[in-house]
Image: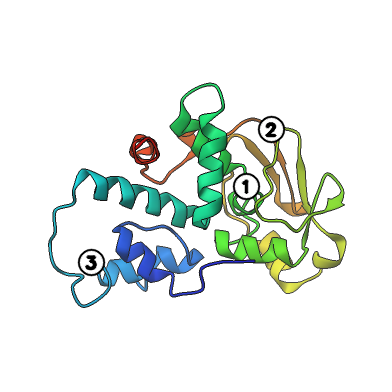
């Protein structure tokens, strides 16, 4: 499975905004963006004015990195969104929100999307009672996610039950004590906290 394996803090610095790729560290003074608020590399501190093309590209890359999706799959999601009824940009973000790894993270069952992806691949979750290990699966209303029985006794998930603080968005319900969550509605545009101008991504793909 192809994935980015480089230093993730560089990605936040390149996009100039927190993408919350390292979980709890992103909320502390150790955050690389807080300490070095400029792009990585020897020319990172130079001020450059982006063209319209550059602005659209940066927005696309920001969203792609936020959800941890590689270019090919990102393109497929956009094609799916463009064929659906409604506003293409919003449809696109809703598809990304419905990814299995994103939902695990949004339920508070992982500290970052990268950790959620790893937990999914290692087989720690079930969907509707059946083991599932594909992070890119798109979940639907009514789907139930739960930690498999043999994983519940692990230190990771025991600590999660004791210290669960995450608040799930309105389209998800979570039962932290039983390490379970459910998709109760379609995600809405208002549920996405990262400042995203999705119209720029639509303009990028419309060329």
Q: Position of residue 3 (x, y in %)?
A: 56, 66
Q: Position of residue 125 (x, y in %)?
A: 77, 57
Q: Is residue 163 visible?
A: no
Give the residue number, with chain letter if any, for mark 2: 184
Give the residue number, with chain letter if any, for mark 1: 99
The structure residue drawn at horizontal position 59% and vertical position 44%, both measured from the top left corner, is 168
Q: Is residue 184 left or right of residue 55?
A: right
The structure residue drawn at horizontal position 57% and vertical position 39%, both measured from the top left corner, is 95
State which quadrant residue 113 falls in.
bottom right
Q: Earlier along the polypeptide chain: callout 2 or callout 3?
A: 3
Q: Mark 1 falls on what kind of element?
A: loop
Q: How many marks?
A: 3
Give the residue number, with chain letter if any, for mark 3: 38
Relative depth, front residue between 105 and 98:
98
The structure residue drawn at horizontal position 34% and vertical position 37%, both measured from the top left corner, is 207
Relative depth, front residue between 89 and 140:
89
- How dense is the environment of label 3, judged by Cα within 10 Å: few (below 14), some, or many (20 and up)? many
């Amino acid at each position: 499975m192809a994935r980015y394996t480089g230093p993730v803090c560089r990605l936040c610095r390149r996009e100039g905004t927190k993408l919350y790729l390292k979980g709890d560290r992103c909320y502390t003074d150790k955050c690389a963006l807080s300490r070095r608020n400029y792009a990585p590399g020897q020319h990172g501190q130079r001020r450059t004015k982006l063209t319209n093309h550059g602005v659209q590209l940066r927005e696309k890359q920001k969203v792609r990195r936020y959800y941890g999706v590689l270019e090919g799959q990102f393109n497929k999601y956009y094609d799916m969104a463009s064929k659906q009824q409604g506003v293409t940009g919003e449809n696109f973000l809703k598809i990304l929100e419905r990814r299995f790894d994103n939902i695990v993270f949004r339920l508070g069952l992982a500290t970052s999307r990268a950790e959620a992806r790893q937990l999914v691949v290692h087989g720690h979750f079930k969907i509707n009672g059946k083991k599932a290990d594909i992070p890119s699966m798109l979940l639907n209303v009514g789907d139930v996610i739960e930690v498999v029985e043999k994983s519940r006794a692990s230190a990771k998930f025991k600590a999660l039950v004791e210290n669960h603080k995450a608040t799930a968005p309105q389209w998800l319900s979570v039962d932290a004590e039983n390490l379970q969550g459910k998709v109760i509605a379609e995600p809405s545009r208002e549920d996405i906290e990262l400042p995203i101008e999705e119209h720029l991504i639509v303009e990028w793909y419309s060329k």
